[in-house]
Image: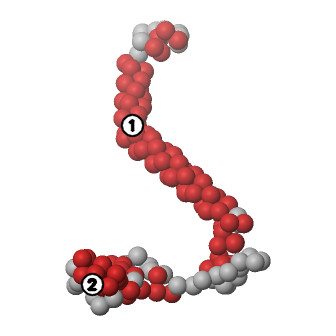
Amino acid sequence: MRSREPFTLRSLFLSKYFFIILSISILIVLTQWILLIPKSSSTYDEIKDARNEVQELESQQKKLQELNTFLQSDFFAEKEARTKLGMQKKDEHVVVLDSFITSGSESDEKSEKNSIQNLDPLRQNSNEKNTTSWWQYFFGE
């Protein structure tokens, strides 16, 4: 009969079963690590996107704070009181010219130009030549 050698740590490390178990463990760890790489890169992308979003929100918050400061200023309150409520300062005379208030559209600009020409007594007929207008101004024909 063959006698068995006593169990030692060295015999464990040199056994083929240990080598197989170690190889399988290393293979499992490597596959998990390889599968984890794309997840970590997508996580980094998400973190980068979140930081960009935070910067955008901070800049938007700064703009809103500036707008809030402007809306709470005395200048804005005075402007709104004058334009929307028709208020005026003491000893101040207000002249309202409704025909000159425009929203900036092209048709409003044309109507403003026409209303300015209609106010000018020399330009009653916009098709007249300049010299004719001066002649009428000086000699009254």
Residue 97 vertical position relative to residue 71 in the rendered view, above or below:
below
Q: Nearer the viewer, residue 73 or 10?
A: 73
Provide residue 82's location: percent of width, then percent of height: 66, 78
Q: Label 1 sits on what residue type?
A: Ile
Q: Residues within 10 Å of mark 1 (few under 14, many from 20)?
A: few
**Which quadrant holds residue 126?**
bottom left
Task: Report whether 2 appears left or right of 57.
Answer: left
Q: Residues within 10 Å of mark 2 (few under 14, many from 20)?
A: few
Q: Nearer the viewer, residue 58 or 100?
A: 100
Q: CA distance from mark 2 to mark 1?
A: 77 Å
Query: Looking at the figure, which quarter contains the N terminus?
Result: top left
Of circles 2 and 1, which is in front? 2
Provide residue 6's location: percent of width, then percent of height: 53, 9
Query: Looking at the figure, which quarter contains the C terminus?
Result: bottom left
Say the numbered circle drawn on residue 37: 1
Q: Nearer the viewer, residue 99 or 55?
A: 99
